[in-house]
Amino acid sequence: MQAIEVNALRKTFQIQQSRGGLKGALQDLFARQYHEVTAVNDIDFSIPQGEICGYIGENGAGKSTTIKMLTGILVPTSGHIKVNGYVPYEEREKFVQGIGVVFGQRSQLWWDIGVIESFQLLRKVYRVSEHDFRTRLDELVERLELQELLSRPVRKLSLGQRMRCELVAALLHNPSIIFLDEPTIGLDIVVKSEIREFLKELNRTQGTTILLTTHDLQDIEALCSRVIMLDAGSIIYDGGLDELKSRWGRGREVRFQFGENVQHAQLQQWTTGLPVTWTQESELVATALVPAELTVSELFSCVLSVTQVTDVQISETSTDEIVRQIYSSGSAEKPGGTLHV
């Protein structure tokens, strides 16, 4: 069963176009001019129950607009949405019982009251029984180590503490789908790691469907097997993260430090017949670019049999680099092939 279904989803906004000068300002008072901006442009995708999907794109690509339509905050201009079998903006009261939302830059907790009091208010909003609330709260507080924070006002929490509390607030009513919009923004590496581990465990143990938007691609790599890439309101890639790496990755770079001076002609001779490209930094250091179809062990076998190696470093094309390549090219088309959406 599909947790989220999106068909030909479109959202446009009418933006006022201001005219310059005093005359233009006076004209704007009586006859405003508008131009239409398309934030989301006829997109289609579906997410099955229990999947963690990354939804990425540059600023202004349409990520947050999509999330707001999926959560019922915005009404689409056209197209169809179903989340948990409901149309979000039409069946809001029933619909919100099955979803949780965390916006990294907005809080659903009350600023001046204790954390536990915010949780109690949310219990009443979602109509959770006292028994279910207490059971769920105890479980989440223990897992996220919030015991000492419950009596503190939200305004006295650090950003990392507040984000952990935001996660609890979004999960108190045990939703089957959770939408995360920049949940780790501004957090240090330790708190990010804790939140990632918590989300993986939540998905593994309870089958919670997670749609994650973020600019931190380490979140995507740590959590998601699938990624949807958005550019100017349109989907330019929808598929596995491994497939994205294999299509756009340049392979692995193996940097050798040799025990004796080596010439470029020797390097090429040692790897004759292998699709390897050598770059030499000095007579003692050289880097081999190894394509995906070649194993590093094959390269090692050729090199180590003929010379002494004192150090080796292996690096792969990062997801950040791949996404940067795609957006800088302005297209999802890979030279020599196409990324199929």
Image (spheres, rainbow, N blue to C red):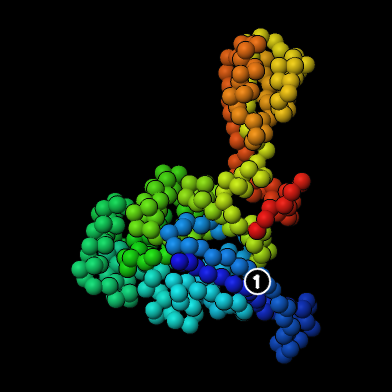
Would you name the residue on which mark 1 appears?
Answer: 42
Q: Is residue 288 above or below residue 13?
A: above
Location of residue 132 by image quarter? bottom left
Q: Nearer the viewer, residue 92 or 146?
A: 92
Q: Secondary structure at mark 1?
A: strand
Apparent side of residue 129 relative to residue 52 in the rendered image (left or right): left
Residue 41 coordinates in the image, percent (x, y): 66, 70
Disc 1 crowd rating (10 Å Cα; few below 14, some 14-19, many 20+) is some
Amino acid beneath label 1: Asp
Quadrant housing the C terminus? bottom right
Apparent side of residue 167 relative to residue 46 in the rendered image (left or right): left
Quadrant housing the N terminus? bottom left
Apparent side of residue 97 relative to residue 272 in the rendered image (left or right): left
**Residue displayed at 73% across by 78% down:** 35
Q: Is residue 27 above or below residue 275?
A: below
Q: Is residue 236 above or below residue 33?
A: above
- Return the residue found at the far left: 131
**Residue displayed at 33% across by 76% down:** 125
Residue 91 visible somewhere in the drawing: yes
Residue 104 visible somewhere in the drawing: no
**Residue displayed at 60% across by 41% down:** 318
